[in-house]
Image: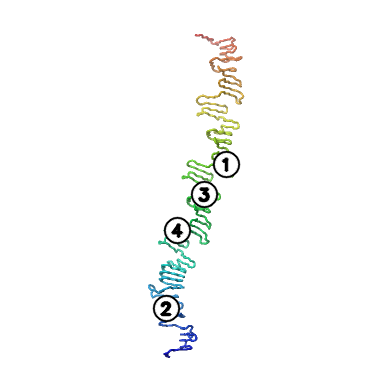
Amino acid sequence: MAVNKNFVVKNGLEVNTNLILADATNDRVGIGTTVPSYTLDVAGGIGATSMYIAGVTTALGNLKVGSAGTTLTAIGNSVGVGTDAPAYLLDVRSAVSTGQTALYVYGDMRVSGDINLDDITLDDVRATDLYVTGLSTFVGLTSTGDVRVGAGFSAVGVSSFHNDLNIAGSTGIGSTVHWDASANTLTFQDDAYAKFGSGGDLSIYHDSSNSHVSNTTGYLHLKSDSISLAAQSAGENYLIANKDGAVELYYDASKRLETTGIGITVQGSVGIRTNLEVAGVSTFGSDVNFYGSAGIGNTVLWDASANSLKFKDDTQAQFGSGQELSIYHDGSNGYVKNTTGYLHLQSDSFSVASISGSGENYIVANKDGATELYYDASKRLETTGIGITVQGSVGIRTNLEVAGVTTLGSDINFVGTATSSIHWDSSGDQLTFLDDTKLDFGSGRDLEIYHSGSHSYIKDQGTGKLYISSNEIGLKNNDATENLAYFTEGAECGFYYDGSLRLKTTGIGATVQGSVGIRTNLEVAGVATIAGIGASFMVGGGGTVFYADRSGVVKIGTASTAASVTINGGSVPSIGLVIALGG
């Protein structure tokens, strides 16, 4: 049927079954269907040389544009540009893999899903998820999702990533560096380095066992007004540092060391394995151990609770550049040794006492006062302004030199080779020399006085005379009850026998009481007077040589003749009497 004018069909139209259907009731046209669901409902393909569509167009089946559908293809849920077999939701391909722009976007592009690109150059990118497998350069990049770059990545300007960012390493398997947007965390996998400096001088990394911050040039500076190092878990502090304040070191959450304006303060023990050099004042609030060469056990211990510095056996406290002064204990005895000069102990008051609880004194010394020596807590010797005072006996084993006056208030024993040789008995005011103990006088010991056990001796063994000087001298027996002799200056001297005076000197000679026996020669110069009743003068046995008595009898050579003068020459004829008168 040919219609050359307007053709109006009312109340519906149907051309052949399922070919064309016009539904006047619902204002719908169906092609290939008798039940159109849309204003124009085409069941099957639409081929058009050109087609203009205004408004929203919905294609329920496949859509292909271009020869063989390679210009634009919509198959299922995929759209292909440059391909009739799209492999992704949006698959854009150029005729060649490189050197030709496959997708050009002028203006903003917003992608809510992933984008996988081999090579991309974008002036400004804002993406939820962006996946790039080739070398990509981003002048400005903003992403609210993932960004994946398979090869090199260069960002010029400011790039913003609003979702996670993964940077793959040389293997390309898994992320080497990961930006976790939800946790605001940039994560480096094991052995992935964050490097700083033109030569990569500063590196930060983890090697699957330990974490490292490595600096190869200059100092590593950590700068902050407050710095802390703490445990990853419970927030336990290791180190706290504050500007214009202290640096603190901790052990198991307890502060152990704190710097101060003059040094450090340590809480607890301090272990120093090598040398400790201290400049200024150091205060230790707890025990301090000093180890020796063996390193086993402390050699010197500062016991804070006892306020004591303790040295183990054979550990010496040494003083002086050459260690001239040493103080130590060898396990048996204590020693204070000085090898140069004097050992001075200086104090205004000084004492040496026992270590026992009684505090028994050995020596007590006071400035401008006495020095005292004790025995078994009893004072035995005390110095005074003029010498010493001794309480009790004094035993001197070698020499005693005394300058000045010495007062001894008790007995004194002077000991010789064996027992005491001289004894001063203070109660009896008596100085006793034992047998054979000599009192010597003179530089050459010229005068000796001693008792041998049998006799007493006064010996002058040197040069000169032995003088006994006094106005009067008397000799008596042991108990001073009997006179032996006396000597009086300017008067007589007398000699006694058994308490009776026998000889007394006079102004012209001597007077003898009793007989005078002369065993050898008698030389008389001057007048000799023999007085007394019955007094006689005899020479020879019984007066046989010469006899004279006060009755006027003179006998020579005999004692029997009654004549007044008897001269007997004896049995040998001789001259009995010679009188020489001038020849």
Cα–Cα gap, marks 3 and 2:
92 Å
Q: Nearer the viewer, mark 4 or mark 3?
A: 4
Q: Tell me what residue is drawn at x 51 percent, y 55 percent.
A: 258
Cα–Cα gap, marks 4 and 3:
38 Å
Q: How many marks?
A: 4
Cα–Cα gap, marks 2 and 1:
119 Å
Labelled pair 2, 4 in contact (Cβ < 8 Å): no
Q: Nearer the viewer, mark 2 or mark 4?
A: 4
Question: The residue under label 4 is which amino acid type?
Answer: His
- Measuring from the top left, give residue 581's x and y in whole percent: 51, 8
Q: Which residue is mark 3?
A: 300
Q: Which residue is mark 1?
A: 361
Residue 475 sits above or below residue 338 on the image? above
- Label 3 Cα crowd, 10 Å radius (few <14 / some 14-19 / many 20+): some
Residue 499, quarter of picture: top right
Identify which residue, 74 or 514, lies in the foreground.
Answer: 74
Q: Earlier in the sequence, mark 2 or mark 4?
A: 2
Q: Which residue is mark 2?
A: 72
Q: Nearer the viewer, mark 1 or mark 4?
A: 4
Q: Which residue is mark 4?
A: 221
